[in-house]
Image (cartoon, rainbow, N blue to C red):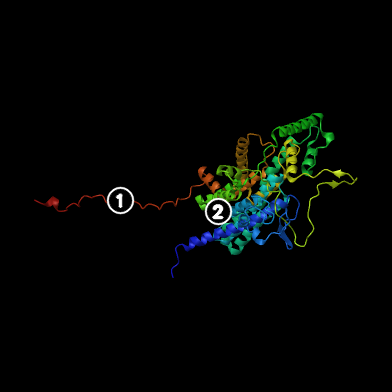
Amino acid sequence: MEDSPYLPALMEWLWYAITFMYGAIVGSFLNVVIYRLPLGKPIGGMTGTKSYCPNCRSYLAWYHNVPLFGFLFLRGRCAYCARPISWRYFTVELLTACLWVALFHRVSAVPPITWVDYVFQAVFGSILIAMVFIDLDHFIAPTELNVVGFILGLGRDIACLTLAFLAGDWVFREQAPHYAYFRYLPRAIPGAIVYGSALFLVSYAGFLYYAKGTRESIGSATRRFLTFEDLPEDLKSEEERAEETRMLAEVEAEEARQGPPPRLRFSPGVTSLLAAILLAVPAGFWGALAFVFPLLAFAAITRRPGEGFVDVFRRFFSADDLGMENAYETRPVAEETAISEPILEESDTGGVLPAALTPEEEANQFARETESGRHGGMGRGDVNLALAIGAMLGPGLALLSLFFATLTGAIVGIIFTRVNGRSLRYGVPFVPFMAAGAIIVMLFGSSIVDWYLVYAGIRKPPPSFSEPPRRPRRQKPTPSAPPADPVAPYRGN
């Protein structure tokens, strides 16, 4: 029986489908991390825990948690109390799945070393997605995720170097430059040092410029920078107190007049559009299905009677859903007592303290303080993320990702300001753009570097295989004079 000519292509797309499935499963877990980690709640997923609806406290069946299809099966609502479920859950699963497929297309190949490289990069990319949504919601970059990201970068280099060493000397000589300097120094270490140092200096300089008091010494400001302390009141001058009071009054007056300034958030439309861009890397034009399918599902599930498709499309790009108020939680199966958050707390003196701020109010309060320069120009969470990205990309590609982070941040800031007609003020954290720059470099970094080296004349362009080499033309033989007759001169004598 002859092999079918379609079998290799079918097997290749089967691997893409498996990768998509695993990416969606990881995205489902990321939704739990995004909601629970900033609130200090256990992530769950361990023995003795089960998902439940925080509104009606009903436990969820296993088929309710199937990535992508479970959300569509429930039509975006709880199966028991019919409370709406945030569309963030569906789009985060889709975005993570498309990222896994795009990285699989660009990174993986037949040798097992590149497969190991792909798995580490895919998990690292998933952590970046979680960091983006957490920073957009809370203006924080959790240290736990940064530590895991650094371990993934260092572990990838060690694992790939070990596999190359076990495969033989010639494989090690070929693969070692991709993961180490001087044959045995993992690339993650100098990458983390270079990128982390660059952002540390930027953060430190911004702190001295914005947060250093007029009467404060550089040593005292440096100590506060390292210990996360606020400027003591006795070191503030009268001018600084007046300026701080004036700025807070201006912010409150503007918010009272126009409402809170716009926050950068990922709507279902924006997240689906990003997923379509990622899926276009392996699928080309068919990658648009990652945007069209969620849009049609959104219209079918949420369309109101008499509502036109244009209004549905506008709501699809609405960013009024942070997804924090209706997240599924996990609790021990044996726990029967109600879990509730106290609205008022008793103080040690017997009085009553005011209600705690919601997560969004805490984020806005921190952002207002950042706008006044109280926390400097760049948070230390960005520096920690730079250590993780540098460990995964290496020093050169990490700095290239910083360029793309700055570029995408400027473009998004300009577009967002024009669309809303107001200044963002404190609505743009930097972690989403650092993650975008890292993902761009993970997908296209090597190609960009090769193009630049050829463009600058540092490296010769590789031979093109777009068309077969032409055979040289056969030269027609030139007519030659007939040979001379040796006896002609003697004829007629």
**Does 490 sit above or below residue 416?**
below
Q: Tell me the CA gap for discs 2 and 1.
A: 46 Å
Disc number placed over residue 475 in the picture, else none: 1
**Does 71 sit above or below residue 449?**
below
Disc number placed over residue 106 in the picture, else none: 2
Residue type at numbered disc 2: Arg
> Can you give x and y, in whole percent of width and height, for residue 63 in the image?
64, 61
Q: Which residue is depicted at the point 51% across and 51% down? A: 286
For the residue pair 9 and 255, the one nearer the viewer reads as 255
Which badge, 2 or 1, is on the more N-terminal residue? 2
Residue type at numbered disc 1: Gln
Residue 222 placement, left or right of 270: right
> Can you give x and y, in whole percent of width and height, for residue 452 in the image?
53, 44
> Can you give x and y, in whole percent of width and height, for residue 406 in the image?
62, 41
Residue depth check, mark 2 versus mark 1: number of the one nearer the observer: 2
Residue 1 placement, left or right of 247: left
